[in-house]
Image (cartoon, helix red, strand yellow):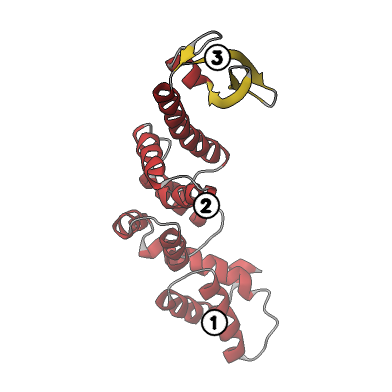
């Protein structure tokens, strides 16, 4: 049997403790592990119990890492899973942490998708194509994307394209109509609007007098 001879707070993290076994540093644990196993000075541990403690510590470490990442910035499940993989955590431990985070609603792709779409519409003024591509890249399920993207109606998409296009057109110093149309089209395509929406918007703008934008 081995004995805990000293327990000390970590200087940079008061929720973690260094455990000394037989007067030598043994391992460090989260405060939740301390409580769950009732670890204290003088407690005797056999190898099986130590292995169980360390296994539990690994699980809580992955979970705590997930909480830390999500507290700084919302992430999709795919993004968080990738960060955990790059951190070197074992696949099974990652799966367990992801399941727990989803049950506690800290990780919710449906809510994330809704927030992302609203931000890109209202802040970045991105079109449907660019929003969908970004969500695919973040690992969001395609069916979920198609369901949530329906919040953007054809009318609202064309309205945003028209407003953005009108403002951009007022800054294009070009007399040649074809060149003007090309520059305006490239701008709207770059913002992520569908080609059909771009063509319709450009033709509408070029044929108007743009009074609202001057």
Q: Earlier in the sequence, mark 2 or mark 3?
A: 3
Q: Which residue is mark 3?
A: 4
User: Do callouts 2 and 3 mark residues in contact (Cβ within 8 Å)?
Assistant: no
Give the left or right position of residue 181, taking residue 156 as reference.
right
Q: Residue at x 39, y 24 (%)?
A: 48
Image location of residue 165, percent across then percent down: 56, 71
Sequence-earlier tag: 1 or 2: 2
- The nearer-to-camera label among 1 and 3 is 3
Q: Residues within 10 Å of mark 1 (few under 14, many from 20)?
A: some
- Residue drawn at the location 49% of the way across and 39% of the way down: 66
Question: Label 1, on which residue?
Answer: 206
Q: Position of residue 26 (x, y in %)?
A: 57, 25
Q: Nearer the viewer, mark 2 or mark 3?
A: 3
In the picture of the structure, the residue carrying the numbered disc 2 is: 86
Query: Helix, strand or loop at disc 1?
Result: helix
Is 76 situated above or below 60? below
- Mark 2–mark 3 distance (CA, rounded to whole Å): 34 Å
Image coordinates of residue 159 in percent, x first then y, are 46, 64
Name the image quarter holding residue 18: top right
Q: Is residue 80 above or below residue 41?
A: below
Q: Residue at x 45, y 54 (%)?
A: 117
Measured in 3D between alpha carbons, the distance from the residue under mark 1 to the one under mark 2, in whole angstroms, is: 50 Å
């Amino acid at each position: 049997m081995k004995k805990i001879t000293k327990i000390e707070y970590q200087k940079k993290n008061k929720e973690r403790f260094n455990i000394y076994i037989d007067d030598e540093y043994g391992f460090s644990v989260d405060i939740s592990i301390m409580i769950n196993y009732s670890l204290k000075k003088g407690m005797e541990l056999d190898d099986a119990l130590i292995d169980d403690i360390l296994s539990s510590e690994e699980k809580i470490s992955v979970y705590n890492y997930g909480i830390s990442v999500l507290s700084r910035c919302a992430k999709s499940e795919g993004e968080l899973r990738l960060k955990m993989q790059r951190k070197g955590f074992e696949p099974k431990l990652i799966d367990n942490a992801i399941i727990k985070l989803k049950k506690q609603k800290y990780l919710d792709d449906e809510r994330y998708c809704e927030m992302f779409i609203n931000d890109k519409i209202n802040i970045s003024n991105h079109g449907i194509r660019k929003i969908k591509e970004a969500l695919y890249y973040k690992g969001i399920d395609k069916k979920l994307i198609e369901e949530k993207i329906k919040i953007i109606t054809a009318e609202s998409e064309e309205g945003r394209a028209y407003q953005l296009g009108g403002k951009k057109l007022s800054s294009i110093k070009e007399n040649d109509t074809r060149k003007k149309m090309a520059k305006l089209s490239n701008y709207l395509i770059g913002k992520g609007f569908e080609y059909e929406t771009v063509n319709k918007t450009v033709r509408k703008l070029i044929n108007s007098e743009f009074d609202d934008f001057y």
